[in-house]
Amino acid sequence: MTGSDVSTTSEYGVLGVRDVDFSLDRYPPSADLAALVERHWLVSWELPPGREASVTLLPHPCVNLVLDAARLTVAGVGRDRFTYVYRGRGRVFGVKFRPGGFLPFLGRPLADITGAAFPAERLWGPPATTLAARLHAAPAVDELVGSAEAFLRERWPPHDPQVEYVGRIVATLLHDRTIARVDDVTERFNIAPRTLQRLFARYVGVSPKWVLRRYRLHEAAAVLDREQHRPWSEVAAELGYFDQSHFIRDFTAAIGMTPVAYAQACRRRQAPVRA
């Protein structure tokens, strides 16, 4: 699996009942940016006065450039689920970079910003402030995407072949069900375990084991939401979890409740998790 047309992140990650009180739209990047950018996204909502709602997310192994309330932020890979509370009318726009795709912009290991977020001005100076104002004033998504992409083009980094290599590995973790352990990755790509760990710390910000587990748990949550009466043990086995207790521990730690409780909450169309 190679090339910028191959996805390196799923469309999963929103936990529980989806598209309630908000909409989430995704837009592909222009072809010349697709080597480093996975997609653009826009969350929007409009609630009556005095009411609030929330959405809980289980993050991908990606850096995002996020515009929220006129503030432009670089958000490193988030390890834990988080809940976003929203009121009134609003929107949040983001650029999701491919795993490894932000390192050429940052110029230092992605592990340095894992679990952290900082103002985009810290990386790009006053032009980031100008971009934030332009994005905040943009009335339509085409203008949001166009302004963000023009900004990135002006700062496009030199080619780094390691980004594509990391992308191939991450795409394999996402798409190939025969990959159940990190050892499978080292054998497939003929890479030493310590070299793989260092590569992921630098380019992705989290370990290959973390990425593999996160993608499988994303899919498990999506299947349990979509097929709420399906035995969770079948879901676990299908995703490569042959130790059921291991699956329960991983799922509960990431989602905040057991697979059975999660499926039941989705069946009741209740927001099942909070950060």
Image (spheres, rainbow, N blue to C red):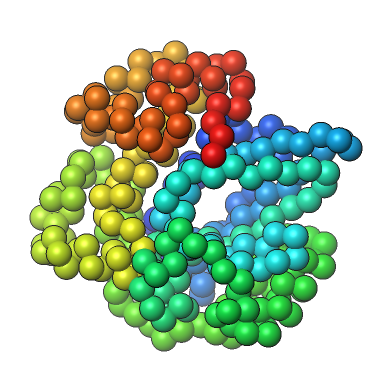
In which image quadrant can residue 163 be found?
A: bottom left
**Whether residue 267 is situated above or below residue 241 in the rendered picture:** above
Residue 246, given in percent of the width and then of the height, sits at 24, 30
197, 230: nearer the viewer: 197
Q: Residue at x 38, y 78 (%)?
A: 108
In which image quadrant can residue 115 be found?
A: bottom left
Residue 197, given in percent of the width and then of the height, sits at 22, 62
Q: Residue at x 50, y 16 (%)?
A: 264
The image quadrant where one finds the C terminus is top right
132, 239: nearer the viewer: 132
Residue 238 is at least partly visible in this image = no
Q: Report how many numbered discs are placed on residues in the image.
A: 0
In which image quadrant can residue 123 be found?
A: bottom right
163, 90: nearer the viewer: 90
Q: Is residue 219 left or right of residue 275?
A: left
**Whether residue 178 is situated above or below residue 123 in the rendered picture:** above
Residue 43, given in percent of the width and then of the height, sits at 68, 49
**Whether residue 83 is situated above or below residue 165 in the rendered picture:** above
